[in-house]
Image (spheres, rainbow, N blue to C red):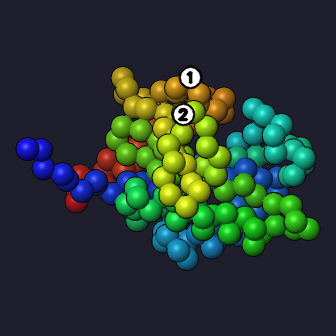
Amino acid sequence: MVRIKKHRPVKLIIGFIFQNESGPDKAKGILKSRFGKIDFESQTLAFQHTNYYEAEFGKNLKRKFISFEKLILPQNLPKIKIRTNIIEEKLSRGGLRSINIDPGYLDMAKLILASNKDYKHRIYLNEGICAEITLFYQNKSFTPWEWTYPDYRTADYIAIFNHIREIYAQQIKTK
C-alpha cells in the first residue's frame, strides 16, 4: 500500500497587469499585509501579447511579477484567488478594474495559475476557481505547453520563473 503524503509548501507568485504604476504599489501593500514579505519583484515589462485588457485598462499596459518569502499550501490557491478578486474590486474605479491580479504558485516541477474561467486544460478546484499548469520544468528551464499564454512563453517571463524557482529551491533545502 502506498502511503499518502502531505504536499510540500509551494511558492506564491502574483502577476499584475496595469497601466499606472500606482496600481501594483497599492496591491502590494494589501498583499504584504496578508502574505508577508516580498522576496522577489521583477522589472516592469511591456504587456503587448493581447489587447484583451485594453477596453478596461487602456493601452500601453505593463506587467510585473512578485513572489513571497512565506510558502503556502497548494490547496489554499482558491482562497487566494478569491482574495485577489476582492482586492481588484477594492482598487477599481467607476466599476472598472485598475489592475489585474493573477495569483499562482510554483514548485520544482511546474507553474500553476489560478483562474475564474474553466476550459478544457484547466482543473476545477473549489469555490469557482480553476487551476492551469502553465509551465513545466524540464532540461533546466521552465517550458510552455501548447495552451500556455503567449506572454508566458517569452524568454523574459521564463527567466523570471526560473529565478523564482532558484529562490524556492534554497528555501526548501533549509526546511
x, y percent for residue 73: 37, 60
Label annotation for residue 121? 2
Quadrant occupied by the C terminus: bottom left
Label 1 neighbour load within 10 Å: few <14, some 14-19, many 20+: few
Quadrant occupied by the N terminus: top left
User: Residue at position x 48%, y 52% from top?
Assistant: 125
133 up-or-down from 30: above or below: above
Would residue 62 be visible to someone looking at this image? yes
Q: Is residue 60 left or right of residue 63?
A: right
x, y percent for residue 166: 38, 44
Q: Secondary structure at mark 2?
A: loop
91 up-or-down from 144: above or below: below
Label 2 neighbour load within 10 Å: few <14, some 14-19, many 20+: few
116 up-or-down from 135: above or below: below
In this view, the residue in front, 101 or 125, is 125
Q: Which residue is mark 1?
A: 146
- Image quadrant assignment for residue 128: bottom right
User: Residue at position x 66%, y 56% from top?
Assistant: 101
User: Residue at position x 70%, y 61% from top?
Assistant: 24
Which label lies toward us, 2 or 1?
A: 2
Q: Type of residue at label 2?
A: His
154 up-or-down from 8: above or below: above
Q: Secondary structure at mark 1?
A: loop
x, y percent for residue 71: 38, 61
- Image quadrant assignment for residue 118: top right
